[in-house]
Image: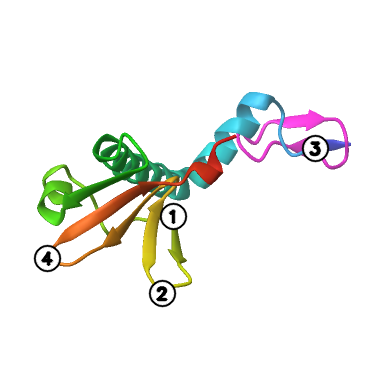
Amino acid sequence: MNQKCLECNTPFSGRIDKKFCSDLCRNTYNNRQNSDSVNLVRNTNNALRKNRRILAKICPAEKAKTRRNTLLDKGFDFNLITSVRTTKKGSTYYFVYDYGYLELDNDFFLVVKDNRTDA
């Protein structure tokens, strides 16, 4: 049965459910279809990794204290986190992968490393 490639419109034969004449056309088609969302995901992941690196530098051990201005000066984005955890006592920690922070009084933050995620 003759079909036409979804990418280059070249006729080809093969399985009835085959949509592309080659792997190159399949990859090109899928990359073009996903390019907008991929850029968004890539940019978000890069910003999350930057936030994690900042927290990791501030907290080389299990816990460390820092000020809001220190985080902001290093380029930390408080809008990008990966999870929120609330303790039994009601404290809310905001996590960027395995590093979290808790807002304290007077613009101080407690930065912690969650060792539960280590494999």
Of callouts 4 and 1, the N-terminal one: 1
Horizontal side, residue 85 vs residue 65: left or right: right
* Structural crowding at the residue carrying mark 3, measured as other residues with C-alpha within 10 Å and reported as few (<14), some (14–19) or many (≥20): some
* Structural crowding at the residue carrying mark 2, measured as other residues with C-alpha within 10 Å and reported as few (<14), some (14–19) or many (≥20): few
Residue at coordinates 34% horizontally, 42% vertically from top-left?
Answer: 52
In the rendered image, which residue does mark 4 sit on? 106
Proximity of marks 2 and 4: CB atoms separated by less than 8 Å: no
Magenta extent: 3-18
Distance from disc 2 to disc 4, alpha carbons, whole Å, reads 19 Å
Nearer mark to the viewer, of 3 and 4: 4
* Structural crowding at the residue carrying mark 1, measured as other residues with C-alpha within 10 Å and reported as few (<14), some (14–19) or many (≥20): few
Position of residue 119 measured from the top left corner of the image (x, y, whole percent):
60, 34
Q: Amino acid at mark 3?
A: Lys
Residue 90: mark in rendering: 2
Question: Circle 2 sits in a helix, a strand or a loop, which is it?
Answer: loop
Say whether residue 16 is magenta.
yes
Of residue 12 and residue 33, the one placed in the foreground of this image is 33
Nearer mark to the viewer, of 3 and 2: 2
Distance from disc 4 to disc 1, alpha carbons, whole Å, reads 25 Å
